[in-house]
Amino acid sequence: MRIEQYEARLRHAMINSSVSELDELLSEELVFTNQDGARLSKDDDLAAHRSGLLKIEKLEHREGLDIRLLGDVAVVCVETELDGKYDGQPFEGIFAYTRVWHRKGNRWQVVAAHCSPVIRGN
């Protein structure tokens, strides 16, 4: 399976809060730095989806995936339009994501990710 397919699975799992799919796609070693600078683990991410604390309603890439394959590592950069609710509070915006995928055997998992808000000037 190609990284584009793993990215599509991840997007689908995030929108549907599919904890079982996220569990497969996220490494136990995951470190996710969110848009506020907080570092989250795989358990943190799964808990937010499992509890309903996080509900993503829209997650659309604004451009194609920029993928760099480096042996057993793939770095993916993408700008995404996102909206949903966190703890009942709506959020929306455009975010730049960087994900690092690592191949273990015949499957890939996200080991690191970073999200930053995209601020456009007037």
Image: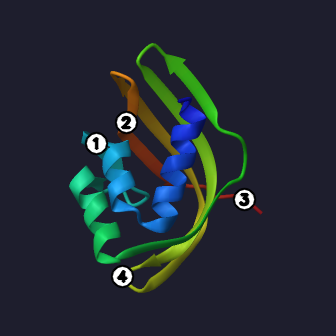
Q: Which residue is mark 1?
A: 30
Q: How many marks?
A: 4
Q: Which residue is mark 3?
A: 121
Considering every residue shown, the one lying at the far bottom of the view is 88
The residue carrying pointer 1 sits among few (fewer than 14), some (14 to 19) or many (20 or more) residues within 10 Å by Cα, namely many
Task: Indicate the quadrant where residue 117 lies.
Answer: bottom right
Task: Indicate the quadrant where residue 76 lies.
Answer: top right
Q: Secondary structure at mark 4?
A: loop
CA gap between label 3 and label 4 equals: 29 Å
Q: Nearer the viewer, mark 1 or mark 3?
A: 1
Image mark for residue 109 = 2
Q: Which residue is mark 4?
A: 87
Task: Indicate the quadrant where residue 109 lies.
Answer: top left
Q: Secondary structure at mark 3?
A: loop
Q: Nearer the viewer, residue 55 or 87?
A: 55
Residue 41 visible in the picture: no
Q: Choose the circle earlier in sequence order: 2 or 3.
A: 2
Q: Nearer the viewer, mark 2 or mark 4?
A: 2
